[in-house]
Image (cartoon, rainbow, N blue to C red):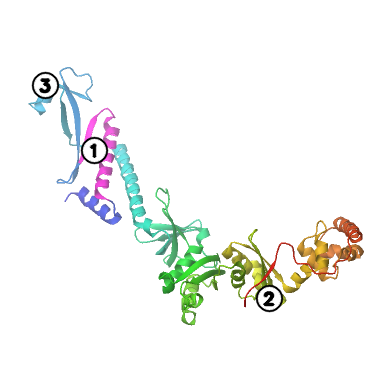
Amino acid sequence: MSELKRILDQICRDKGIDRTLMIEAIEEAVRSAVRKKYGGKRDVEVQYNETLGEIEVFRYRTVVDDVWDEESEIHIDEARKLAPDIELEEDLGEKLDNVAELGRIAAQSAKQVIIHKMRDAEREVVFDMFRDREGSIVDGIVQRFERGKMIVNLGRTDAVLPREGQIPKRSYKQGDRIRAYLQEVRHDARDSQLLLSRTCNEFLIKLFELEVPEIAEGIVKIMGASREPGFRAKIAVASSESDVDPVGACVGVRGARVQNVVQELQGERIDIVPWSPDPARYVANALAPAEVISVAVDEANHSLLAIVPDDQLSLAIGRQGQNVRLAARLLSWRIDVKSEKAYQNLSSPGCQSLLELDGIDEAEAERLADAGIDSPEKLAAAPLAEIVRLTGMDEDEAALLKIQAAEAGQEQPDKTDAEPVPGLPQDETED
């Protein structure tokens, strides 16, 4: 077996590249090298001889009786020395024997053509291999790091896990085994064709699909997911069969199933909540572990107001607003959370009258009402420094507010009947 044939077979076997494509690449490379060496006027044909395992190059010239261009023409007397039966105007093919001596520049050109063709062929192989696996979990080994990106070897090729796709607080080192979600398989990418993620919601969903047979069977469905990777996540689940508890199925015996997912996500806390088509009940479930007393629904603006006990307001909101933020992403609704006392204050006639003043928002009205300033008359009589302290306004804004409150107090009589918050009817959630 010739050296060329041996190398050709090895490359096709190791890289998974089609042999025909490699032969075409070599032929094109040699054709380019011949033109570099002898010029572009020559009519040459390059072909791979499978039997000999070598590249053959043939130069073709037209037979004439008066030569004007030696590159493309040959005199009939000289031609008949090579082919006695040749006639005028026919093309004579001559095999070039010194193909291996094409020169350094020509050889370099051939090398570049082969490398380019090999890369194109490899990209096609990778695309064909992984296009059906897009949207699934893949396993690999950490190869190296490049400017924050993690290069992961998947066996036949490498994939990229960008910085934004990596879970915070956990560092991998070279040689570690890693699992990730294959987010995108790009066909014509210059760099890596395979893009991974460990921070997307789909990674969390796919992990549960692997751990919970009821999800794979379609009995339990994941209706939504939201994450703050490395810290906390929420998933909403529903069951198509009344005798199957979707939350229990995902938790598993002694929490085994959910703990496997938590371990893969490096300790990310996961809340599993029952899904409901009723937004009021759904948000009550999503704000767990906080208890929700009632929910006011504004369907027109896709917003919800959840009322919680006074001692559970911080629990419902979560650290730095994390709990309510994840719940809002889960529902794709805007969620406001208020304590029972704050809601009662907000619903009081005094607080409502304060909200009618320009420049007063709900938070400022609540703080004023908590301090006993629950009407325009009391606001007009309150010390300027106290208004500044409670509202955060500067003295000029507070002075204008006092004037506005005094005018409002003269125009409107006191209200004695409680009024609900406008636009937000109260819907009691079922126990």
Q: Secondary structure at mark 1?
A: helix
**Mark sitting earlier along the chain (2/1):** 1
Describe the element under mark 3 as helix, strand or loop: helix
> Which is more toward the observer, 89 or 30?
89
Residue 20 highlighted magenta (yes or no): yes
Q: Which residue is mark 3?
A: 77
Q: Nearer the viewer, mark 1 or mark 3?
A: 3
Q: Residues within 10 Å of mark 3 (few under 14, many from 20)?
A: some
Q: Is residue 204 magenta?
A: no
* Residue type at the position of mark 2: Gln
Q: Give coordinates of residue 172: x percent, y percent.
A: 47, 66
Tell me how far mark 2 sits from mark 1, CA to CA: 85 Å
What amino acid does circle 1 point to? Glu
Taking the image as shown, residue 148 lies to the left or right of residue 384, namely left
The image shows residue 140 at horizontal and vertical percentages of 40, 64
Taking depth in this image into account, of 203 and 62 the one nearest to the observer is 203
Q: How far is disc 1 from disc 3 in space, using C-alphas?
A: 29 Å
Q: Main secondary structure of the magenta part?
A: helix
| 373 with respect to 72 (left or right) | right
Location of mark 2 (residue): 312
Q: Residue furthest front?
A: 417
Q: Quadrant of residue 96?
A: top left
* Quadrant of the image occupied by residue 14: bottom left
Region of the chain picked out in magenta, as a range:
18-47
Q: Is residue 331 above or below residue 272?
A: above
Residue 127: % across, % down: 36, 53
Which residue in the structure is indicated by mark 1? 101
Q: Residue at x 24, y 29 (%)?
A: 42
x and y, in percent, of residue 213 in the image: 41, 73
Q: Is residue 62 above or below residue 393?
A: above
